[in-house]
Image: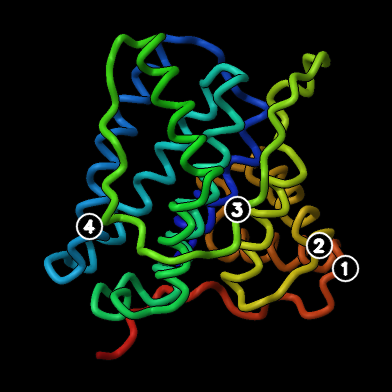
Amino acid sequence: MCRTAFVAAVAVVALSACGGDTVADTCEQASLLENARARVERAVTALEQTSQLELEEATLDIVDRLSLMREVAPRDLRSPLGVLLAAYGQLTVTLGNIGWDPTLATDDAAVQAARRAFTDQSVATANTSLAEWVADQCGREQSALDPAFAASGTTLPLPEVSEEPSRDVDEESAVSENELQALGLVLGETYGLALTDVEAECVARSLGVTLGEASDAVLDDDAFFAEVVKVFASCGVTTPPTTTPSTTTPDN
């Protein structure tokens, strides 16, 4: 998985410090998100006709779009958007781990499991909540999820995201513990590390702070990886990452 995908997957953790709350901005992002979703559905459901570059760009794009939309969305949309971000982020990680090779993706067990996650009830509920909000607030109907996008079968459900309202203004845009754990587990997987829930939450939260305080202009690949190693160690991970996520294409 390349650093771009890694940053996109954890970027949601930093959003609570800069979130907006305007209907116009959210509607604009919803339109862009629907285009991104249509693109990734085409890429994943027709792998035999999809190039490696298109598969990579399509999956990274929808993660970016979800992150941006969650940044400006009203509080009642942040939980469903968090569920969708976890689902698409998981798919992006598994595809990145095989170099976004469409041929390998066809039979890769991890990719198929990530696709099956879109059959989970939590994802269906999140999609419904988003579609209803867009219809009510933006006056636009969203297209339904392509059934062929999610492989058939069952998988472990995504972590539930609490939608209980918070009375604390500072907590309204906070990422839940379950979201942090889900993101942290995905991030650990990119380095081949199996984290505990506690470690995963700590890693996701700490990296979110790092991304919130530094931009790409001041945090290059080497500096970012140094921060990753430091964060994993500070969170008590006994086997810290020693190499950056794979950016190479497997040999055919």
| Residue lying at 34% horizontally and 46% vertically, measured from the top left | 61
The three-letter code of the residue at mark 3 reads Leu
Compare marks 2 and 4 and give the one earlier in the sequence. Answer: 4
Of circles 4 and 1, the one toward us is 4
Q: CA distance from mark 2 to mark 3?
A: 18 Å
Disc 4 is placed on an element classified as helix
Q: Which residue is mark 4?
A: 43
Q: Give the CA separation, mark 3 to mark 1.
A: 25 Å
Q: Earlier in the sequence, mark 4 or mark 1?
A: 4
- Asked whether the residues under the numbered discs 2 and 1 touch, taking CB atoms below 8 Å apart as contact, a structural biologist would say yes
Q: For numbered disc 2, what is the local secondary structure?
A: helix
Q: Is residue 176 above or below residue 106?
A: above
Farthest-out residue, front: 153
Q: Position of residue 252 (x, y in %)?
A: 25, 90
Question: Label 1: which residue?
Answer: 236
For mark 3, what is the residue?
158
* Residue bearing the label numbered 2: 199
